[in-house]
Amino acid sequence: MKSSFIVFIRWNLFPIFWSLFILVLCGLPGSDFPDAIKWKLLSFDKFVHAFLFLVLVLLSIKGLKIQPAFKTLRYNSIKLALGYAFFLSIITEVLQDQLFIERNADVYDVIANLSGSILGLITFYVIYGKENTFRFSSNE
């Protein structure tokens, strides 16, 4: 079991580090960011949120698909990656509201995060094709 966990971590380092990067960015004080026009869903901030979660979902699906340790994770990679992105989106907003300095929760950030997550799934399909034809390892 211990070696399986290490193998899992090895194949998922990029999504783990990207998740930490998202948390660090979301935890920075609001004064560290330049003032921008606030148009709710069309501000630069929302595009950044969408991009961060697009990359997160893309990396998470790929990492779960190529890790050889847990077959169930490979077959449920899309559901798990989207669920994880939704969970991280909610957690970052709660942390912004309750813990981070000069930050507050914003439902439009969650919408941007989820939009980016869906775009990550679409990007995965554009790059790799259908899920059932996606193979990185020959262990399947």
Image (cartoon, helix red, strand yellow):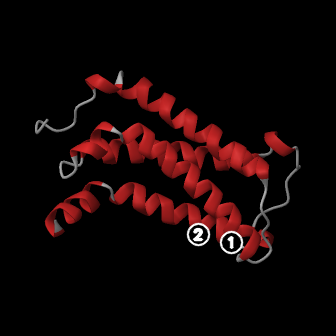
Residue indicated by mark 2: 24
Residue indicated by mark 1: 28
Does the image show residue 35? yes
Q: Which mark is residue 37?
A: none
Label 2: state its secondary structure.
Answer: helix
Residue at 19 percent of width and 59 percent of height:
7
Image quarter in which the C terminus is found = top left
* Image quadrant in which you'd find residue 132: top left
Which amino acid is tagged 2? Val
* Image quadrant in which you'd find residue 137: top left
Residue 94 at x, y = what percent?
A: 69, 65
Residue 71 at x, y = what percent?
A: 22, 44
Residue at 36 percent of width and 41 percent of height:
77
Residue 118 versus residue 18 in the image, above or below:
above
Q: Are marks 2 and 1 in contact (CB under 8 Å)?
A: yes
Q: Is residue 1 left or right of residue 76?
A: left
Q: Is residue 32 left or right of residue 67?
A: right
Q: Is residue 57 left or right of residue 101?
A: left
Residue 102 versus residue 37 in the image, above or below:
below
Which amino acid is tagged 1? Leu
Residue at 50 percent of width and 47 percent of height:
83
Label 1: state its secondary structure.
Answer: loop
Residue 68 at x, y = what percent?
A: 18, 48
Q: How many marks?
A: 2
Residue at 72 percent of width and 68 percent of height:
96
Say which of 3 and 12 sits in front: 3
Say which of 30 and 72 sits in front: 72
